[in-house]
Amino acid sequence: MQKFANHSGLIHIGALLDAINFRLRFNTINGVHCVDPKISHGDILASMITLMSIGKPDYDAIYR
C-alpha cells in the first residue's frame, strides 16, 4: 500500500525559506567547510526540511 502526500504546501515552505534567506545563512556559517562542495549545505538542509514536511524523513526519498 502506498501513502499519498499532498505537496501543495511546499510552495509556502519554499517561500518561507526564501524570505528568511535560509540557504544563504547556512552557506556562510563559519567553521563549516567542504573542499569541493557540489551541493551547498543550505540546499541539503532545505531539501531535508522539504522531505520532512511531506512525511518522508529519509534522504533517499529525494529520488522517488
Image (cartoon, helix red, strand yellow):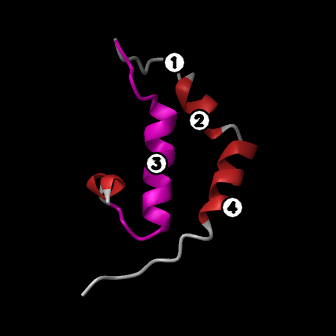
Q: Is residue 30 above or below residue 56?
A: above
Residues drawn in magenta: 36-57
Which residue corresponds to mark 3? 47
| Among the two numbered marks 2 and 3 on one chain, the one whose residue lies closer to the N terminus | 2
Which residue in the structure is indicated by mark 4? 12
Marks 4,3: beta carbons within 8 A: no
Q: Secondary structure at mark 4?
A: helix
Instruction: Compare marks 4 and 1 and give the one earlier in the sequence.
Output: 4
Q: Amino acid at mark 4?
A: His
Identify the residue at image location x=57%, y=22%: 28
Tag nearer the camera, 2 or 1: 2
Report helix, strand or loop for mark 2: helix
Mark 2 or mark 1, earlier in chain = 2
Seen from the viewer's position, the closer of residues 30 and 7 is: 7
Q: Position of residue 48 (x, y in %)?
A: 43, 51
Mark 3, Cα crowd under 10 Å, few <14 / some 14-19 / many 20+, is: some
For the residues labelled 2 and 3, the Cα–Cα distance comes to 10 Å
Q: Which mark is residue 30?
A: 1
Find disc 2 in the rendering and name its residue. Answer: 23
Residue 55: where, in percent of width, then height?
41, 71
